[in-house]
Amino acid sequence: MQQRVRRGWAVRIAGLALALGNVAAMAQSFEVIAPDLHLLRGAFVPGQQPDGNSVMLRGRDGWIVVDSGRHAAHTQALLDHATQSGVPISDIINTHWHLDHVSGNVMVRAAYPRAEVHASRAIIDAQHGFLADYRRQLVALAAAQPQSPELPNWVAEIERIDHGARLHPTLPVLESGRRRLSRRDLDLHLSTAAATTGDVWVYDAASRTLIAGDLVTLPVPFLDTACPAGWRKVLDDLRDQPFTRLVPGHGAVMDRKDFRRYRVGFAHLLDCAARASETAAQCADRWIADLGTLLPVSEHARTRELLDYYLPQRLRGAAASADCPRR
């Protein structure tokens, strides 16, 4: 179990650990999920923070990487894949600023200095707010517990935060629209009140693939930096895209039926949280029932533990709107 920090324990603070107990899934090889579209699943390893899913889309002039991971091994796999194909990386798209999706930018751009980074500018505010708070907590933990086996992980996280401006977009996404990257047309959509204040989700019409980032995650929605009500509306926007497959920020590729289960379950989770008479356990039961086979039985205990945190900390009372834009 991870250290407790502000906003409860670091279940997912700025893209922190999902790995609870002894649950683990080692890094997987690339999956070809459509022509010229390859997926590297994020890994969950005990004692480490996770990596988000990464997608590589092949354009005419290079690979487009969507989310670059946290750990060097994950990012190196992306670089090796490009090297083995004989095709360079021309662009990076970051779906949001959590560390398990942006930290690898530094390695990728060291190898390919001309690679452009397409992302919202929300990371800049996060570096002065959420990430700055997180860094202070890590420094305090390291000072108070210098013999802890977690010390190398805390130091590594501090170093990732300290990349600073090297994580910023070079071509910011300021509004939704089409971009031609490596002579491949992609629709980049910007949502400013959902999982974060700057989620970029990608629709590739050529393969009818929607890359959702952390707007869709398993085993639960990761709500640490979220505006739940806004997120709920954005899921309706995703539904309206003509996709045949959806790549989540964490978890396996979904079809439309899978996504419908997720969207309905999300709505029911928020509705359940709004009813004071419902306990966290009852809301978790409903979520598990709604998602059905999307949640293996082996994931149920972890799901309940996560929702036992999120219900009081992020979905009830003032916390439910704490990260929503002020009107």
Image: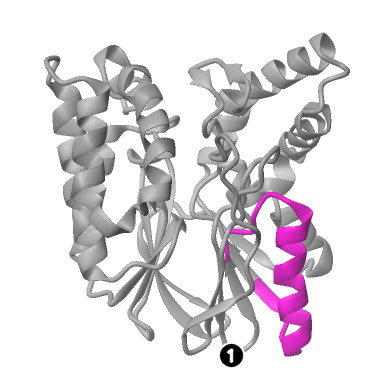
Asked if residue 82 is among those painted magenta in the image, a careful observer would answer yes
Residue 216 coordinates in the image, percent (x, y): 36, 52
The foreground one among 150 and 263 is: 150
Image quadrant holding the N terminus, namely top right
Report crowding for label 1: few under 14, some 14 to 19, many 20 or more residues within 10 A (C-alpha): few
Height in image: 262 above or below 130? below
Image quadrant holding the C terminus, namely top left
| Residue drawn where x is 59% and y is 74% of the image | 64
Instruction: Say what secondary structure mark 1 lies in.
Output: loop
Quadrant location of residue 272? top left
- Part of the protein shown in magenta: 66-90
Height in image: 156 above or below 142? below
The foreground one among 302 and 176 is: 302
Asked if residue 287 lies left or right of residue 89, the reply is left
Q: Amino acid at mark 1?
A: Arg
| Residue drawn where x is 54% and y is 60% of the image | 53
Height in image: 151 above or below 161? above
Residue 123 coordinates in the image, percent (x, y): 56, 39
Residue 294 coordinates in the image, percent (x, y): 31, 57
